[in-house]
């Protein structure tokens, strides 16, 4: 009797093992090696109760049935999606959006991540955006018009469209209609999770409440350090493999500088009262001993100039915050004179403060301008008006060019406080980027 053996189907790996395999595969790909350390931050688990997947910004939980329904490439997309939430600290950074509108906050964050993942692997060699098995549509938010935006920018657009009642590509991306319903914590899930479901509007849950209340303050600070370190180490690892770091991730790792402290230290360093010995008058404490020593004469700081860009982009709360901080620095250092220059393509306003007036600059000042941006007008004006300060502080958005030759006559220390542009190179002095 002839017995014919038939090939048996290869048993499918359990969800836990499949996720491990995906982690390893992503680590070995130069495009995703950057996230190697991030996969190890927090706890990764699988259960039978989570409908799809979820994260609280540290831990990632995957639903067993959902994982089993995905292909390997779709699972890799899901794993990267959850870890990108962790990478961008979405559940803490954009908490204010969630408090304003739960659904739109979820959708905005997902738009950003999904578009970036598709951009990382446009040929789908490693990642494939999960699709609904019935309709064939992408699961989750996806709209190419949001390419290159952050969650806040997407959120603002979606919210404006909700107010206008626009139909078409709403928060869900492919089809659907925007909704301005606020919702309550816990809608669509337990423990304050907002489930987006598998109906074309999303494929994971965002545990905002777990991120807010489930972690102590010390745990939140440690998580920040862990994520930062994981990305930095991942960047080194990816570099050795020939991979590159995206602009968005690079910005995350840019050292955060407290501009208020920089301004405070800079001004105080160069405007502190100076003491110098003088032989014009003998030191009285030693005359009775027939010892003649020079007396110490304090030289009070004389002049501080603040040049404010009023070209139209440096306005609002940040300008007020800067003026308030500057006012405090002036009060602490107590220079004899403070000049405030408001400029765009020329100096449109010039104010001088002395004595008691210096303590109320923020309340008395009157910004003027609103045209283009040409910082070279500042040294030209200073020279024409014989302003020779001890220190010059400049506030601008940095979207401009400058001729170093125009600044050759400026010999005092100069601090450029730049809001916005990361590419501006000052012609003279020190630079600090402001991000409030």
Image: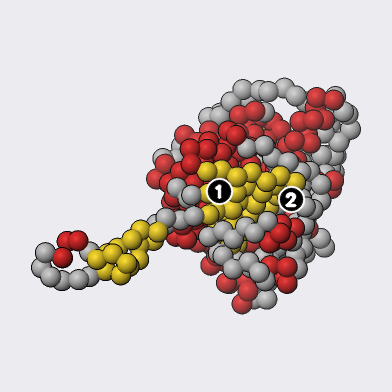
Which residue is at 45% across, 47% downward? 334
Residue sitting nearer the eye, 233 or 284: 284
> Would you say 207 lies left or right of 281 here?
right
Label 2 Cα crowd, 10 Å radius (few <14 / some 14-19 / many 20+): many
Answer above or below: position of 29 versus 57: below
Quarter of the figure that contains the C terminus: top right
Find residue 321 and report its horizontal and vertical position in percent: 58, 40
Which residue is at 44% across, 40% downward? 215
Answer above or below: position of 28 versus 102: below
Let me know if residue 275 appears in the view: yes
**Mark-to-mark CA distance, 1 and 2:** 16 Å
Label 1 Cα crowd, 10 Å radius (few <14 / some 14-19 / many 20+): many
Of mark 1 and mark 2, the one earlier in the sequence is 1
Residue 30's image quarter? bottom right
Task: Please say if the residues under marks 1 and 2 sit with CB atoms less than 8 Å apart.
Answer: no
Find residue 237 and report its horizontal and vertical position in percent: 58, 72
């Amino acid at each position: 009797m002839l017995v014919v053996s038939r090939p048996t189907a290869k048993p499918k790996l359990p969800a836990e093992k499949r996720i491990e395999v995906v982690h390893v595969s992503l680590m070995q790909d130069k495009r995703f090696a950057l996230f190697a350390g991030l996969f190890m931050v927090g706890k990764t688990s699988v259960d039978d109760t989570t409908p799809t997947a979820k994260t609280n910004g540290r831990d990632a939980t995957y639903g067993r049935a959902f994982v089993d329904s995905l292909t390997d490439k779709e699972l890799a997309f899901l794993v990267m999606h959850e870890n990108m939430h962790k990478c961008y600290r979405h559940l803490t950074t954009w908490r204010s959006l969630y408090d304003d509108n739960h659904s739109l906050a979820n959708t905005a964050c997902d738009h950003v991540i999904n578009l970036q993942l598709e951009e990382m692997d446009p040929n789908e060699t490693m990642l494939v955006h999960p699709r609904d098995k019935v309709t064939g549509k992408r699961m989750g938010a996806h709209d190419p018009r949001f390419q290159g935006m952050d969650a806040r920018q997407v959120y603002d657009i979606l919210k404006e469209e909700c107010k206008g009642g626009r139909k078409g590509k709403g928060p869900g991306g492919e089809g659907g209609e925007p909704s301005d319903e606020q919702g309550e914590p816990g809608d669509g899930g337990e423990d304050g999770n907002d489930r987006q479901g598998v109906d074309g509007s999303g494929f994971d849950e965002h545990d905002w409440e777990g991120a807010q209340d489930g972690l102590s303050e010390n745990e939140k600070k440690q998580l920040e350090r862990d994520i930062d370190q994981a990305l930095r180490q991942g960047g080194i690892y990816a570099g050795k493999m020939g991979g590159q770091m995206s602009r968005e991730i690079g910005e995350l790792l840019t050292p955060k500088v407290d501009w208020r402290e920089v301004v405070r230290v800079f001004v105080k360093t160069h405007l502190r009262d100076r003491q110098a010995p003088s032989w014009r008058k003998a030191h009285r404490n030693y005359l009775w001993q027939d010892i003649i020593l020079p007396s110490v004469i304090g030289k009070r700081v004389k002049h501080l100039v603040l040049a404010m860009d009023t070209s139209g982009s440096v306005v609002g709360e940040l300008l007020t915050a800067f003026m308030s901080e500057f006012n405090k620095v002036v009060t602490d250092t107590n220079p004899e004179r403070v000049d405030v220059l408001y400029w765009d393509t020329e100096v449109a306003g010039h104010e001088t403060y002395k004595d008691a007036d210096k303590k109320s600059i923020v309340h008395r000042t009157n910004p003027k301008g609103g045209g283009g941006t040409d910082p070279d007008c500042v040294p030209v004006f200073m020279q024409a008006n014989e302003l020779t300060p001890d220190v010059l502080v400049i506030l601008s958005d940095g979207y401009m060019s400058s001729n170093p030759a125009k600044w050759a006559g400026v010999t005092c220390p100069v601090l450029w406080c730049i809001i916005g542009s990361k590419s501006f190179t000052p012609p003279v002095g020190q630079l600090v980027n402001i991000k409030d």
